[in-house]
Amino acid sequence: MTENIENKFKSARKLFPVTGNKKNITYLNCASTGPLCKPIKKVLDDFYEAGLYLDKNWDYAAFADLDKIRKLGARMIGARADEVGFGFQTGYGLNIAAFGLPLKRGDEILLSDIEFPSNVYPWLALKERGIKVKFVKSENRFFDIDNFKKAIEKKSRALSLSFVQFFNGYKNDLMEIGKICRDHGMYFIVDGIQGCGVETIDVHKCGIDIFAAGAQKWMLSPQGTGLFYIRRDLQKKLKMPFASWLSVDWKLNFTDLFHYDLPFFDSARRFEMGSYPYSHVHAMAAALELIDSLGIENIQRHNHRLLDILIAYLKASDYYHIVSNIKSKHRSSILAFACDNVGEVHKKLLENKIICAHREGAIRVAVHLYNDETDIKRLIAVLDEFE
Ligand SMILES: Cc1ncc(COP(=O)(O)O)c(C=O)c1O
């Protein structure tokens, strides 16, 4: 990375109080919750201050800039702005998929057997409509493409899969998997929350039909924000599982609302639900702008460089072993490792204010743009006590 980019990362770090000395925290837990930065706090403070007095024309102020945010989100995943809408979390977009896709009794949905539950229950809820879920067996806790191919039958209509697996950071090869879906006439739905904002992706090239991601993790945004993408030519073929006053093209006309014949938006917005959590959505813009200014490729490189230090330490250790797949194609900004007494090591890390997660028998470390080498060194210093 050039010196210029490195300086940008140093400046970005300063925007995140979680990295400061005030609370002496080492934050390595973005896969759970993304920390907020100062520009976000400013947007939220301004919104709440305005909410105390409501002295500006709130009706219109709340809607300003929403298109800009959709565009930023779209650029992050290689989509068009009219393919992206605001959801409140990942489950929002996944429910649009489950209840909107033209599925019928007897159809089957394939899921991996190691999905986060957000990407399981919307599909299981289709049981009463006679639509079944089949779990594809993972190997070594990684999604297995051969098992996926073997699982496909005539009645298989869709695969819904995580971009990055939440507990071990396994990044799925969405390009190859998308091609298999297309070859079999199956819809391809992606739970993108563990990758969106930190991993490069082109939803078009991967042949993804619907992509859903809460913004509360790697998009570094407040809770209750998120994005969904729906492929352009699929939008009108989806059933509308719900509709709201913001699903129609009302042209921001607050003065004349009794026309109930307005057309639904000819874009992903037809699946948006009113009213938005405006303050949080506006705050999201500050985070997306920061991510955009650094560039996802640079962020990915920055994060991998940090995790390389940890990987070298773990590889040399007799005590710990890496459980993540660290091949370049499958690695992400999450690294999981285990040892005999994971619970105890995790407890010790928390006592030392090294914030990381204990998931599925391993310690999960998640780094993002605000982390630097000192964070990894502090982690290693505590791990070393168990060697
Ligand atoms: C892969 C994955 N999907 C979804 C979620 C959360 O879902 P939602 O944003 O709907 O709360 C998480 C973690 O919280 C996750 O790791």
Image: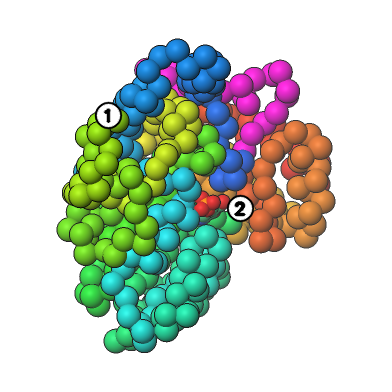
Q: Secondary structure at mark 2?
A: strand
Which residue was labeled with disc 1?
Answer: 255
The image position of residue 48, as x and y in percent, is 54, 20
Viewed as shown, does residue 45 lie left or right of 291? right
Q: Is residue 302 above or below residue 80?
A: above
Instruction: Indicate which disc residue 316 carries.
Output: none
What residue is shown at x 32% (from left), y 76% (from top)? 103
Q: Which residues are magenta?
A: 1-28
Q: Earlier in the sequence, mark 1 or mark 2?
A: 1
Q: Nearer the viewer, residue 289 or 122?
A: 122
- Is residue 169 among what the camera can see? no
Going by the numbered disc 2, the residue's amino acid type is: Ala
Q: Nearer the viewer, residue 331 or 217?
A: 217
Viewed as shown, does residue 117 lie left or right of 97? right
Q: Is the CB of the residue bearing disc 1 within 8 angstroms of ligand 1?
A: no
Which residue was labeled with disc 2?
Answer: 336
Q: Is residue 99 above or below residue 289?
A: below
